[in-house]
Amino acid sequence: MAGVLWTVIVILFVFWLIGLILHIGGALIHIALVVAVVLVILNLLTGRRTT
């Protein structure tokens, strides 16, 4: 599950960079970045726990 999550994060970050460089997408690009940051935080908080 963590592999899929990191893939989504990377894809969203790449789309954000493309939108930032080419000035396309408007607010949707920034929403994608916020989603990526939220996913990173969730992954860090709910990551693997050692027992």
Image (cartoon, rainbow, N blue to C red):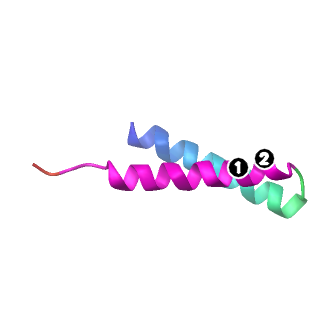
Q: Residues within 10 Å of mark 2 (few under 14, many from 20)?
A: few
Amino acid found under the numbered disc labelled 1: Ile
Q: Residues within 10 Å of mark 1 (few under 14, many from 20)?
A: few
Find numbered disc 1 in the image and state the secondary structure of the residue it sits on.
helix
Let me know if residue 34 is in the magenta part.
yes
Identify the residue position indicated by label 2 in the image. 28
**Predominant secondary structure in magenta?**
helix
Find numbered disc 2 in the image and state the secondary structure of the residue it sits on.
helix
Residue 18 location (% of width, % of height)? 79, 56
Identify the residue position indicated by label 1 in the image. 31
Amino acid found under the numbered disc labelled 2: Leu
Give the side of residue 25 with respect to residue 5, left or right: right
Residue 39 location (% of width, % of height)? 50, 48
The image's mark for residue 10 is: none
Of residue 42 and residue 7, the one placed in the foreground of this image is: 42
The residue shown at (52%, 52%) is 38
Residue 36 location (% of width, % of height)? 58, 51
Of residue 9 and residue 32, the one placed in the foreground of this image is: 32
Q: State which region is magenta.
A: 25-49
Most extreme residue toward the bottom is 21
Dot 1 and dot 2 residues touching (CB under 8 Å): yes
The residue shown at (68%, 48%) is 32
The residue shown at (89%, 52%) is 24
- Depicted 15 relative to depicted 23: above or below: above
The residue shown at (39%, 36%) is 1
Residue 13 location (% of width, % of height)? 65, 54
Most extreme residue toward the left is 51
Give the side of residue 32 with respect to residue 24, left or right: left
Let me know if residue 39 is in the magenta part.
yes
